[in-house]
Structures are given as structure tokens and as C-alpha cells.
Amino acid sequence: MSSTKQVVKVGIADLNITTAPHSIRTSGLGSCVGCVIYDPVRKIAGLAHIMLPDSSLSRQTKMNDFKYADTALPILVDQLVSAGARKTALKAKIAGGAQMFKFNSQSDMMRIGPRNTEAVICELKKMGIPLIASDTGGNCGRTIEFFAETGDLHIRTVSKGESIL
């Protein structure tokens, strides 16, 4: 029997799931938020790369549901439950939500990173999923990789090195 570990990659405005012993990774988290939801006992994990806080911002007739916190996270939970995760056991870890550029305007619309973080936290609360760890804010990009076997979220932050949540 082969136990080759694979890394499932998640693109921008995308989501996917994996099981132990595999891991799941996304890169390019600037103002975007990477949200990992997982069942620590069944070792099933999902990752959504959230680009924007609210689907009401969409002006497209054919919307990418994986792009927004309010649409992607319920889909991710449904996929996890379909794969065998227990909804009552789900936990979450998040990273990203940086403010990548300085603006002279005080407009709330320009605070995309913090708004993404707030929207993800709000959606997790609505679904009753505890947020057990986060690394958000700042002004640096991040790459994250979650290991379904251990529940560890490895975060590589530009110019700051690596950490584990």
C-alpha cells in the first residue's frame, strides 16, 4: 500500500478538500483570507481562498461562488460533510486579510483585507464553527498549508518567515 503524501492546491477564489495524510495549500494571500475548516478526529480538511467579503458586491450575471465569504464557506462545509466530516466537530483556522496598500481615503471600501477577515469570522459564527486560531492583518503576503493529519496550519509570511498555528 502506498502512503504517498500529496498537496492539494487551491487557487484564488477557489476551494477544495483533502484527508490525512495529505495537506492542502494556497498561495498569494494578500488581502484575501485563507479559511481552513476541518474535522480533527476524522482528519478531513477544506480550504477556501476568499477574495471578497460579500456576494452582493458581484456585478456579474454568472458569479463565482468560491470568491465570496458568504457563499464559499457554506459550500465548503457542505463538501466536508459530504466527505464524512461531522458538522458539530468542525473547527476553523484563518490567515491573510492584509492591508496591502496605503490609501489616503478613509473609505471603508478600501479596507478589503480587514473586511474580508470580518466577513469570514461573521460567517463562521453564523454556522457555529469555532475559530481556534488566526494570523491576519499586517501588510505582507502569506502562503498557507494545512496538514489534515496533525491539524497544523503552516504560514509563510513574506519577509517574516514561517509560523505554525
Image (cartoon, rainbow, N blue to C red):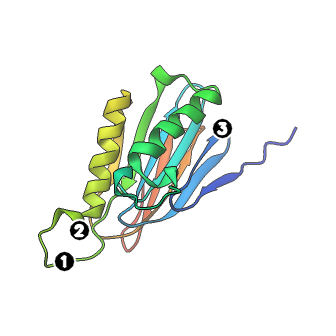
Horizontal and vertical percent for residue 161?
41, 67
Q: Nearer the viewer, residue 18 or 110?
A: 110
Q: Left of 53 or right of it: where is 91?
A: right
Image mark for residue 110: 2
Q: What is the spatial separation of the Cα atoms under label 1 and label 2, in whole angstroms?
A: 7 Å
Horizontal and vertical percent for residue 139?
29, 70
**Residue at image mark 1:** 103
Q: Nearer the viewer, residue 71 or 99?
A: 71
Q: Is residue 165 visible?
A: no
Give the residue type at disc 2.
Met
Residue at image position (39%, 51%) is: 55
Q: Left of 150 or right of it: where is 95?
A: left
**Residue at image mark 3:** 20
Horizontal and vertical percent for residue 2?
85, 42
Residue at image position (65%, 38%) is: 19
Q: Element under label 3? A: loop
